[in-house]
Amino acid sequence: MINLDQLNFHHLFYFWRVAKTGHLTQVAKALHTSQSALSVQIRQLEDRLGEPLFSRDGRKLVLTSTGQMVFTYCEDIFGLSQEMLGQLAGQSAGMSRLRIGSVATMSRNFQENWIRPLMSEPSLLLTLESGPLEGLLDRLRQHQLDVVLANETVPADPERPLFSWFLGSQPVSLVGPVNEWSGRRLRLPEDLDGLDIAAPAPRHALRMQFDALCTAAGVRPRIRAEVEDMAMLRLIARDSGWLTVLPEVVVQDELRTGILVTVGRSSELQEHFYAIANPHRDPNKLFERLLEKRSMV
């Protein structure tokens, strides 16, 4: 068994980069070294550990079971290193950094409402990015994000545990243009049969709830738009003239200014909001402050 002071972290770094792609040539080019030199570094690591880390599948390198375990630890080692450099960069500028990832289907209004308590901070350095949930969770596990905002909980994985904090929920509403629907009310879904409706895309959790509710009631609305991005659904609701099914937080400004009105609401349709973070590290102090103030607005 080798001691920690015998472990060459330069070898680990080369292994980590190759493990992420499965190709020596690509990594050698990116690191400005030769393929043979890279192979020697990885072979020396394998000799030191006493286990093969890769097997070959044609021209691609595939991780062995030992290689997969080592790669998991390398993700933490170099992910934390990246986090450290990011924190140092923020400190050198006299800033406190919070890196937030958000699923693409999350309401931008909800995100802004959630971070608003920090926006008066003179030393805040805020990083916001969006994308598919799995990609964001990978970046969270690699310590490249402090928190991920999502409208679903994280799948259970004992080997890579993450924790979900419930931030709140909101009933889904039916909204329409004020000039056509002011003072009118519809039951959702009973009164939607044959009406022109814009709705979240079929993969969205809200859409699945909505379809199930309509099917159970024997109602068939005329779906005119299926929209994955909530920012686009907001524009459709505002400009199309159709009725739109969405959480009111998405169109909070349009409701406040009277461009849109709430035509109906269903407590059976709920969107839930979660903050997902890594439980095996000290939480970001800014994130802790937001959790203390969490509420739906």
Image (cartoon, rainbow, N blue to C red):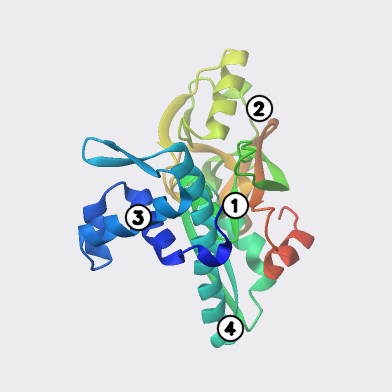
Q: Nearer the viewer, mark 2 or mark 3?
A: 3
Is any atom of residue 190 visible in this view?
Answer: yes
Dot 2 amino acid type: Arg
The answer to whether the residue labelled 4 contacts the one labelled 1, judged by CB atoms less than 8 Å apart, is no
The answer to whether the residue labelled 1 contacts the one labelled 3, judged by CB atoms less than 8 Å apart, is no
Dot 3 amino acid type: Ile
Q: Residue furthest front?
A: 1
Q: Residues within 10 Å of mark 1 (few under 14, many from 20)?
A: many
Q: Quadrant of residue 282?
A: bottom right
In the picture of the structure, the residue carrying the numbered disc 4 is 91
Q: Nearer the viewer, mark 3 or mark 4?
A: 3
In the picture of the structure, the residue carrying the numbered disc 1 is 149
Could you give the CA–CA distance between mark 4 and mark 1, rounded to whole angstroms?
25 Å
Secondary structure of the residue carrying tag 2 is: loop
Q: Counting residues from the N terminus, which is met first, the one under dot 3 or under dot 4?
A: 3
Q: Counting residues from the N terminus, which is met first, the one under dot 4 or under dot 1?
A: 4
Residue 147 percent location from the top left of the image: 61, 57
Dot 1 amino acid type: Leu
Secondary structure of the residue carrying tag 1 is: strand
Could you give the CA–CA distance between mark 3 and mark 4, rounded to whole angstroms?
35 Å
Q: Residues within 10 Å of mark 3 (few under 14, many from 20)?
A: many
Q: Counting residues from the N terminus, which is met first, the one under dot 1 or under dot 2?
A: 1
Residue 157 percent location from the top left of the image: 61, 37
In the picture of the structure, the residue carrying the numbered disc 3 is 42
Between 41 and 141, the residue placed more toward the observer is: 41
